[in-house]
Amino acid sequence: MDALTALHTRKASPKLVEPAPSQDELTQIYQAALRAPDHAMLRPWRFLVIKGEARNKLGELFVSAMQPDTEEQRNKLLKAPLRAPMIIVAVSTITEHPKVPAIEQIGSTAAAIQNMSLAAHALGYASIWRTGAVAFSDAVKLSLDLKTSDEIVGLLYLGSSTYENIPIPEINSEDYFEEWT
Ligand SMILES: Cc1cc2nc3c(=O)[nH]c(=O)nc-3n(C[C@H](O)[C@H](O)[C@H](O)COP(=O)(O)O)c2cc1C
């Protein structure tokens, strides 16, 4: 798939199933992430790759970190990681830098997530970028051996789409782009 086709046709898929990308394909997806623009080459990212049984452990970690009030919330957290064969948790590890504020480091990590999503799509897979309360919880960060100063920029759920021909919304460029003179 050429780059413009990938850009124009990528669509998030809320429910993902096997097959997940193979190890060779994952290497290509990881390389795409690592080509994200990166001011001062800080490499402000870390990626936790969670597959198979580890997804159940992640669900349990969510429950113990988030301390849900109801059984319904507990089950939702427990099952959340099972919505795809694999998840890549993209973390921005913020470094103090005189020219590169945190927002730029988070922006780089966001670009890395989008690069992975596009690479997966180009290889015939699908994904969805999610966050939610778990991404912003200090207790979740600490349970994942992250620092509270780290930012979980996204959880990229990855696999094969269960949907065929998800419509791509038509959006007028003129609504968002204007020539400034
Ligand atoms: C930072 C960020 C966080 C997101 N978090 C969620 C989320 O928690 N749950 C969700 O259903 N979609 C979330 N989305 C939106 C989906 O990834 C996706 O963009 C949306 O479903 C629209 O589909 P599309 O990307 O194919 O247009 C998030 C997107 C971004 C950029």
Image (spheres, rainbow, N blue to C red):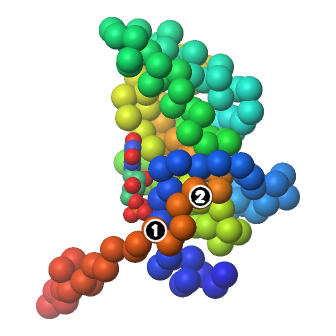
Q: Amino acid at mark 1?
A: Ile
Residue at (74, 26) in percent of width and height: 53
Q: Which mark is residue 25?
A: none
Residue 51, image x, y percentages: 72, 36
Earlier in the chain: of badge 2 and badge 1, it is 2
SS assignment at label 2? strand
Spatial distance from mark 2 to mark 1, Cα to Cα? 10 Å
Q: Residue at x 38, y 17 (%)?
A: 72
Q: Is residue 120 above or below residue 145?
A: below
Check the image and report above or below for 14 versus 179.
above
Residue that mark 2 sits on: 161
On screen, residue 9 above or below 68: below
Query: In this view of the protein, which residue sits in the foreground, 83 or 113?
Result: 83
Q: Marks 1 and 2: in contact by CB < 8 Å?
A: yes
Q: Residue furthest left?
A: 181
Between 14 and 179, the residue placed more toward the observer is 14
Query: Mark 1 highlights which residue?
Result: 166
- Whether residue 33 sits left or right of residue 11 in the image: it is right
Helix or strand or loop: what does disc 1 sit on?
loop
